[in-house]
Amino acid sequence: MDTEIKSAKTETLDHKNAEAELGGGQKRIDAQHKKGKLTARERIALLVDEGSFEEIGKFVMHRTRDFGLDKEHYLGDGVVTGYGTVNGRLTYVFAQDFTVFGGALSETHAEKICKIMDLAMKNGAPLIGLNDSGGARIQEGVLSLAGYADIFYRNTLASGVIPQISAVMGPCAGGAVYSPAITDFILMVENTSYMFVTGPNVVKTVTHENVTAEELGGASTHSTKSGVTHFACANELECIQYIKKLLSYVPQNCEDEPVRLPYEPSDENRPKLSAIIPENPNQPYDMREVVEEIVDAGSFFEVHQAFAENIVVGFARLAGRSIGVVGNQPAVLAGVLDIDASTKAARFVRFCDSFNIPLLVLEDVPGFLPGTDQEWNAIITNGAKLLYAFCEATVPRVTVITRKAYGGAYDVMNSKHIGADMNYAWPTAEIAVMGASGAAEIIFKREIAESDDPQAKLQEKVLDYTNKFANPYRAAHRGYIDEVIYPEQTRQKLIRAFQMLENKVATLPKKKHGNIPL
């Protein structure tokens, strides 16, 4: 009891000394700095506006007295929780402190996190989790496991209600990984953070694979191979800057609108767009160049940049308005849709729809990626996720077809048939079941085979098919394309379209929830 009173006095008299008390000694804090890591309080100080942080549960200590825990008590129990403002907007935050029991989650540690999660839900404000924990506190047994489940439950209830962002700034293993996995965005720091369900030692025992923690679940692995993390950051400072930038594009909650920046109209023509599409329809180009020319200068903030690079997703501003961008990437795999691209885009579309962020789709897709690997790993189910996400979205949705729109992928990429509000096409657009060459070979197979010069006949039929189908005008005649526009007009047309759709109201059939193909 005397120890607890002494600790409380120390906290009251001097916050800096209390931080050392919370951290279990200055030596351990210095050791973390040498690894390129900040303390929990330093991370929060960098995240929130200066002087705005109000801590909750500062004097909480663990209750368990077993296995030596009766000898060590630290104020806060390994997690700093509270609220503050980020660029003037209310934000709730928790930061796990690895210098206290390795940041291990206990019953009281979890209670502190749950308390601010509840407050975030009640007050409709984003929740930021700065994760740095060795996992469940073993000495507490089922109490720590129950604590994780309490957090998971709240993560799920908050999903789609308030933005939830997880920064993994150290170890995150076992059950601890599922809370970030449920949240909207995950950021990791290269070389100092990792995530995995089972660690390298267990992997070696079970599968006899020798793998390091970094190889198994580091930032590079999860940003390129698994897609678990959306941003791999060079250091913790960059990670925190990314969180702030991400928050600037999203609203406080599902009933709010994203912050709109002031914008003065000017010449919206973008002549560079006319020269982006190559004359050869099989030659690639970078869809990011199209995005950069369309959106406000320097506003494009790409998400999942290193994962499933055949599709590009991210936030941007158009005339000061926050929008979500989804675009096929012809520079990688010709922009085809595959399993990873479909799930990546579907997740992003559903986030934007949850938080009233209009969607812009830039389409140049030759279809779905063929092959046994794709079919055996459920391209059907995974491709349907993107289709489902677009069909379900009620935010303003605008599509621009820049070049190819073939087969079922044309339908999936926000076509008019699945509820898109406005669909534009450049004159270079080709809307068809498949490419002209393949179509001609199927349709005119007998005629080509019986010809004296099959190759010449094939080229003749390819040209016929191209002239008839490989253009945007047949679709425009049917009303599937609202307007065929010159590329340089794209920005102006989109600004007007999103202004027109600003007060869009769309309702889904009454139901408990849909059953997305998972």
Image (cartoon, rainbow, N blue to C red):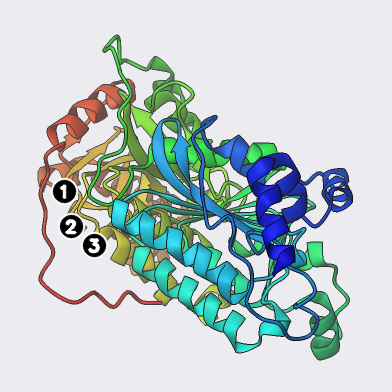
Q: Nearer the viewer, residue 96 or 206?
A: 96
Q: Is residue 339 visible?
A: no
Pair 1/3: label in front: 3
Q: Could you tell me the amino acid type at mark 2?
A: His
| SS at badge 1 | loop
In the drawing, what numbered circle is on residue 417? 2
Q: Can residue 505 be seen from the camera position used here? A: yes
User: On the rendered structure, is 303 left or right of 326?
Assistant: right
What residue is drawn where x is 45% and y is 57%?
184
Q: Nearer the viewer, mark 3 or mark 2?
A: 3
The correct choice, above or below, for 154 with respect to 58 in the image is below
In this view, the residue in front, 83 or 130, is 83
Q: Earlier in the sequence, mark 1 or mark 2?
A: 2
| SS assignment at label 3 | helix
Label of residue 480 in the image: 1
Q: What's the amino acid at mark 1?
A: Tyr
- Left or right: 281 as drawn, with respect to 31: left
- Circle 3 Cα neighbour tier, 10 Å, few/some/many (<14 / 14–19 / ≥20): some
Mark 2, Cα crowd under 10 Å, few <14 / some 14-19 / many 20+, is: few
Of labels 1 and 3, earlier in sequence is: 3
Type of amino acid at the residue the image marks with label 3: Glu
Against 150, residue 60 (above or below) is: above
Q: CA distance from mark 1 to mark 2?
A: 8 Å
Q: Nearer the viewer, mark 1 or mark 2?
A: 2
**Which label is found at residue 168?**
none
Relative to 499, residue 232 above or below: below
Q: Which element type, helix, strand or loop, lies under badge 2? A: helix
Residues at discs 1 and 2 in contact (Cβ within 8 Å): yes
Instruction: Please tell me which residue lies in front, 41 or 350.
Output: 41
Instruction: Identify the residue at image location x=74%, y=64%.
Output: 3
Q: Which residue is mark 3?
A: 392
Cβ atoms under marks 1 and 3 closer than 8 Å: no
